[in-house]
Image (cartoon, rainbow, N blue to C red):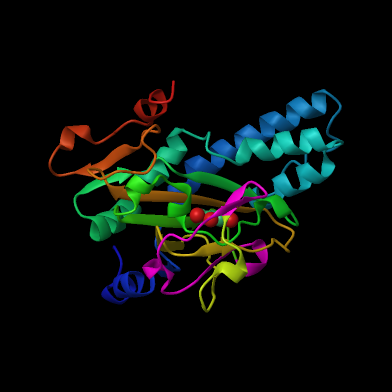
Amino acid sequence: MPLTKTQLAHYLDEGYVAVEQLIPTHAFTALIAEIEANIDAKARALAAEGKLDDLCEGLPFEKRLTRLCAAATDEQSRAELWHVGHGKHHRTAGMFAVWTEPAVVAVAEQVLGLEVLAHPQYNLRAKLPDQPETVVPWHQDLGYLERDADETFMLNFWIPLVDAPMATGALQVIPGSHRWPVLPHEKSDGYDGVSEENLPAHEVVDCPLPLGGALLIQSRTMHRSVHNTSDVTRWSLDLRYCDSRKPTGRANVPGFVVRSEEQPNNVMRDWRDWAALFM
Ligand SMILES: O=C(O)CCC(=O)C(=O)O
């Protein structure tokens, strides 16, 4: 079922809503299996080259990458392992299954209407314990997009693929910041961010979530993620949706239509057609 009236009102009034049970966990099965297979293949390749002391077999999803990175004999191998799971390159059947998961699309339709685009900006994130480069500073998603998207309403889902209490480096939001203009974002440590002293007066809300939950924010909602002080990898996705007739702020990167009343034939049905857009 999509959002309750109360959840929807909270999302629209406060600029965010954290929903603890939104997505059936079977929606992630294929994606997690793909990631695990890719990590296993990389681990075996590194071990064959003598760059990994332990395959860490049999560990659960949230633990294996953590241990493999610790077992890598050099920084380059550790980075290669991490990059297997972290980034924007994962265009697969499993990822497409999450993008098109009925529980997710139903919320997108409830918020955006009947013409829904899977926005080109998305990430799969593997946030390792004690890994400063995955601590994301305060930002508005619009800070990463071209200004033509300023008037495009966007729905951002932050979706943990494991249980994500705050200690794993979950997200914080600033309630009401969706009414702020797009503040100047500055490059720092690979991110576009806004420093604390440049923020208007604000309160901060922690958004821990269990697996199956999702945090929904808007494109001006100020948010950040905190340090992962746990011993597990915080796996997550951030996906955005918008009206397919509006500018995305990423004119050169294609999204794909997940719902259309006006042009149902434009709805993408097969992940391979999505992947082919990038070849
Ligand atoms: O997952 C994170 O650590 C940050 C996510 C984020 O900033 C986003 O979804 O825009």
Which residue is more in the foreground, 237 or 135? 135
Residue 274 on image: x %, y %: 37, 30
Figure quadrant of the C terminus: top left
Decide: is 180 above or below 239. below
Decide: is 107 above or below 16. above
Figure quadrant of the N terminus: bottom left
Residue at (48% x, 56% y) in the render = 159
Instruction: Describe residue 6's horizontal placement relative to residue 72 as left or right.
Output: left
Residue 92 on image: x %, y %: 46, 33
Residue 142 on image: x %, y %: 43, 53
Q: Is residue 3 visible?
A: yes
Residue 59 colored in magenta in the image: no
Which residue is more in the foreground, 104 or 183? 183
Query: In the current view of this chain or complex, which residue is farthest to the left?
Result: 262
Q: Quadrant of residue 257?
A: top left
Magenta stretch bounds: 165-192
